[in-house]
């Protein structure tokens, strides 16, 4: 298995060792030349020596970080790593297999904390953070980072993005967490191709601006997508289905300029609930089989536009409006 991984790493090395993802004005990521080194980690190397080579890899991921220079690539062989990792320099950290390369945080505040810009974490299972508020599998306190192809399980929050911009969460799975992703006081972040199931909240966005959610699926959560005190959120080609009978799909409160387009929203308690919000656009969506309402508008919401949508077989009402103005 490890020989196969080495072959894969050679391929990844060819692609990544000379490049690192950077940001452009609109948050799009592209590649830039770096020409940096490579470090290996294997929890099976219990006796040493440990120098980070493929022959003598470090036993712990944190040791590799301590001995790395900026923009090195750290390759981690499959195993269970009982660590609380702090990434304070720009690095790319790649696991052998996302299901079997596991970082167990032992119920501490965080499993991984990222304080350096330009950090990339790929192909891990992140599990067992603490259960207090703001405890998380990954805490991001920096910018221009990417988390990709990871699994988050049994955390208070899978990923907590705090006051940070230009991060991308891509192709990750969140299940059995208090909440999958919590974005607070942040802007210009993107969530793409992620999967949320069996969480209290799938994606929780608070006091944030310019967040894009693309191609994400959320089912059997309490609430799939919750937006509070936020503006300029786009949800494109997403699905919210089979979420709690008394909660539901897309919920927003005190928000403005929210765009939900080309989404499937079905078999929830409420498909979309809008409170105290303005300039809400629901476009080209399917809302059906929701237990209570397809769309519930209340508490002085204004300029709600529902256009080119299919609303059918919602058990109480397709659209219910209380103190709302919509088109």
Image (cartoon, rainbow, N blue to C red):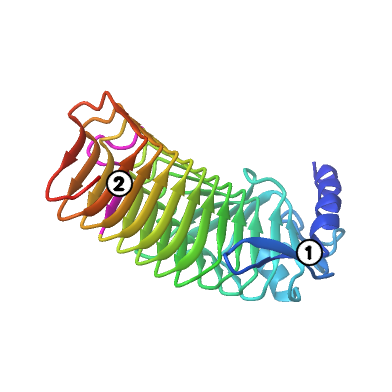
Frontmost residue, 61 versus 195: 195
Q: Mark 1 vs mark 2: which is more N-terminal?
A: 1
> Within 10 angstroms of label 2, few (less than 14), some, or many (20 or more) residues?
some
Task: Point out the image quarter for the C terminus.
Answer: top left
Q: Is residue 183 above or below residue 200?
A: below
Give the total of numbered labels.
2
Q: Which residue is mark 2?
A: 305
> Within 10 angstroms of label 1, few (less than 14), some, or many (20 or more) residues?
some
Q: Is residue 165 left or right of residue 122?
A: left
- Residues tagged 1 and 2 counted as in contact (Cβ below 8 A): no
Question: Residue shown at 47%/65% (left/top)?
Answer: 161
**Quick one: SS at disc 1?**
strand
Q: Position of residue 319 (x, y in %)?
A: 21, 36
Q: Is residue 232 magenta?
A: no
Question: Residue shown at 46%/59% (left/top)?
Answer: 211
Frontmost residue, 1 versus 44: 1
Image depth: mark 1 or mark 2 in front? 2
Disc number at residue 19?
1
The answer to whether any part of residue 200 appears in the image is: no
Magenta residues, start to end: 242-253
Gap in angstroms between the C-alphas marked 1 and 2: 43 Å
Q: Is residue 56 above or below residue 63?
A: above
Q: Position of residue 209 (x, y in %)?
A: 41, 65
Question: Residue shown at 20%/46% (left/top)?
Answer: 297
Task: Point out the image quarter for the N terminus.
Answer: top right
Q: Is residue 294 left or right of residue 257?
A: left
Q: Residue furthest left?
A: 323
Q: Is residue 244 magenta?
A: yes
The answer to whether any part of residue 247 appears in the image is: yes
Q: Position of residue 197 (x, y in %)?
A: 43, 40
Q: Is residue 293 left or right of residue 11?
A: left
Q: Is residue 36 left or right of residue 102?
A: right
């Amino acid at each position: 298995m490890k020989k196969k991984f080495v072959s894969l790493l050679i391929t990844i090395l060819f692609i990544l060792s000379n490049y690192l993802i950077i940001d452009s004005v609109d948050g799009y990521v592209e590649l830039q030349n770096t020409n940096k080194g490579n470090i290996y980690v294997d929890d099976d190397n219990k006796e040493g020596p440990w120098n980070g080579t493929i022959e003598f890899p470090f036993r712990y991921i944190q040791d590799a970080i301590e001995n790395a220079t900026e923009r090195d690539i750290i390759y981690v062989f499959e195993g269970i790593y009982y660590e609380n990792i702090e990434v304070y320099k720009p690095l790319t950290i790649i696991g052998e297999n996302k299901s079997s390369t596991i970082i167990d945080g032992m119920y501490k505040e965080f499993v991984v904390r990222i304080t350096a810009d330009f950090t990339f974490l790929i192909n891990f299972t992140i599990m067992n953070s603490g259960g207090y508020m703001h405890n998380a599998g990954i805490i991001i306190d920096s910018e221009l980072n990417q988390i990709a192809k990871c699994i988050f399980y049994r955390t208070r929050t899978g990923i907590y993005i705090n006051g940070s911009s230009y991060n991308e969460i891509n192709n990750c799975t969140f299940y059995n967490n208090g909440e999958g992703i919590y974005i607070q006081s942040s802007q210009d972040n993107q969530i793409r191709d992620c999967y949320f199931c069996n969480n209290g909240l799938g994606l929780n966005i608070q006091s944030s601006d310019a967040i894009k959610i693309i191609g994400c699926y959320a089912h059997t959560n309490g609430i799939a997508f919750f937006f509070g005190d936020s503006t300029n959120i786009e949800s494109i080609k997403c699905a919210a289905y089979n979420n709690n009978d008394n909660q539901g799909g897309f919920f927003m409160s005190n928000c403005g300029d929210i765009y939900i387009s080309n989404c499937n929203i079905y078999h929830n308690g409420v498909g979309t609930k809008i409170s105290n919000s303005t300039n809400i656009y629901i476009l080209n969506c399917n809302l059906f089989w929701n237990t209570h309402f397809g769309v519930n508008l209340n508490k002085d919401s204004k300029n709600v536009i529902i256009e080119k949508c299919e609303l059918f077989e919602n058990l109480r009402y397709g659209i219910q409006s209380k103190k709302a103005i919509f088109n």
